[in-house]
Amino acid sequence: MSNKEYSLEAAYDPQSRYDDLSRFEPEFWKKKKLEDLNKEEWELLCDGCGKCCLNKLEIKGKIKFTNTRCRFLDCQNCLCKIYNRRFEKVPDCRDIDLAAIREKPRWLPKTCAYWLLDNGFDLPDWHPLKTGRADSVHKAGMSLKDKDTVSETGIEDYENYIIDWPDL
Ligand code: SF4
Ligand code: SF4
């Protein structure tokens, strides 16, 4: 595979998702259950942190995050380089649906908007739906941007990479 094949769509601007929030009911995430959201509302909830793309281990019934990231995650903007083909290219890439959100043990980071809402919490103040800015997740230090992560390529012993960050 070439890097070119997996380069991001140059035209995609994450900010474009938040430029016209007036189309949505204000604070729709407080008024509807996750199961009642439409597709666009559902997608807007994702804060773009990229932390669900870290590799994890299940040890004694608990999920341990590692600082190894999927080889297709762009660590500068926390976007998937192959978003439209991710399930085809990465068999263990997970769709974020209700089953995934409610799975035990929890494998989504504790800042994940879907997990927070499903467990009765509000979105954090830095969430792009509250700030209107896609980059507020990065500025708050809640994404993988500028974090100490490594690509999974070539890694064999994931146990050496286990991390215990407070936002996981
Ligand atoms: S952890 Fe949740 S909010 Fe963050 S990128 Fe994954 S699905 Fe989106
Ligand atoms: S393929 Fe899946 S796990 Fe890998 S970066 Fe894309 S969304 Fe994340």
Image: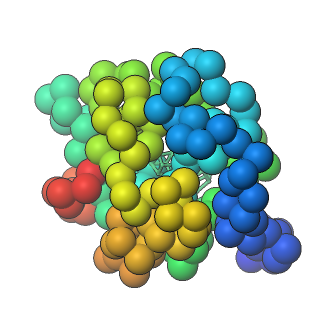
Q: Is residue 71 above or below residue 117?
A: below
Residue at 52% over, 60% down: 128
Residue at 57% over, 69% down: 133
Q: Is residue 18 visible?
A: yes
Q: Position of residue 144 (x, y in %)?
A: 41, 68
Residue at 65% over, 38% down: 25
Color scheme of the displayed model? rainbow
Q: Position of residue 27 (x, y in %)?
A: 53, 41
Q: Quadrant of the N terminus?
A: bottom right
Q: Position of residue 44 (x, y in %)?
A: 63, 47
Q: Is residue 1 above or below residue 23?
A: below
Q: Please tell me in which quadrant of the rendered image residue 93 appears.
A: top right
Q: Is residue 149 visible?
A: no
- Number of numbered labels in the structure image: 0
Q: Nearer the viewer, residue 5 or 114?
A: 114
Q: Is residue 13 above or below residue 55?
A: below
Q: Nearer the viewer, residue 140 or 152?
A: 140
Asked if residue 90 lies left or right of residue 168, the reply is right
Q: Please tell me in which quadrant of the rendered image residue 16 appears.
A: bottom right
Q: Position of residue 10 (x, y in %)?
A: 82, 76
Residue at 85% over, 74% down: 11
